[in-house]
Image (tube, grey):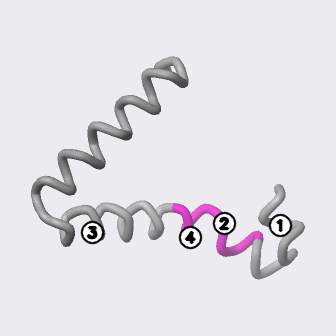
Amino acid sequence: MIPSDHFTRFYNEVFKFLEDQGEEHLEAYWLEISKNQEKHTLELFKAKGLKGMYE
């Protein structure tokens, strides 16, 4: 696992790179991340609402 300050720098560089490739690449990346997030949280949210999101 990388330290949090390295993680933040890494993400900044990823976003800069994708933005340089074109805004559509950055948007595609965000959509892919959101699919993964939905996969992990959707069922809890459906079952327990905002309390499920806290979990």
- Residue 41 found in image quarter: bottom right
Q: Nearer the viewer, residue 19 or 31?
A: 19
- Amino acid marked by disc 4: Glu
Closer to viewer: mark 4 or mark 3: 3
- Prevailing SS of the magenta stretch: helix
- Picture layout, residue 1 above or below residue 52: above
Q: Is residue 38 magenta?
A: yes
* 10 left or right, relative to 21: right
Q: What stretch is highlighted in magenta?
A: 37-44
Q: Going by the picture, which residue comes out furthest to the bottom? A: 46
Dot 3 crowding, Cα within 10 Å, few <14, some 14–19, many 20+ = few
Of mark 1 and mark 4, the one earlier in the sequence is 4
Q: Which residue is drawn at 20% across and 68% down?
A: 23
Q: Which mark is residue 41?
A: 2
- Amino acid type of the residue that numbered disc 2 sits on in the rendered structure: Thr
Query: Which of the two discs, 2 and 1, labels the residue nearer the N terminus?
Result: 2
Label 1 Cα crowd, 10 Å radius (few <14 / some 14-19 / many 20+): some
Q: Is mark 2 on a helix, strand or loop?
A: helix
Identify the secondary structure beneath mark 3.
Answer: helix
Q: Earlier in the sequence, mark 3 or mark 1?
A: 3
Give the side of residue 10 with respect to residue 19, left or right.
Answer: right
Is 30 situated above or below 6?
A: below
Residue at 10 percent across and 57 percent down: it is 21
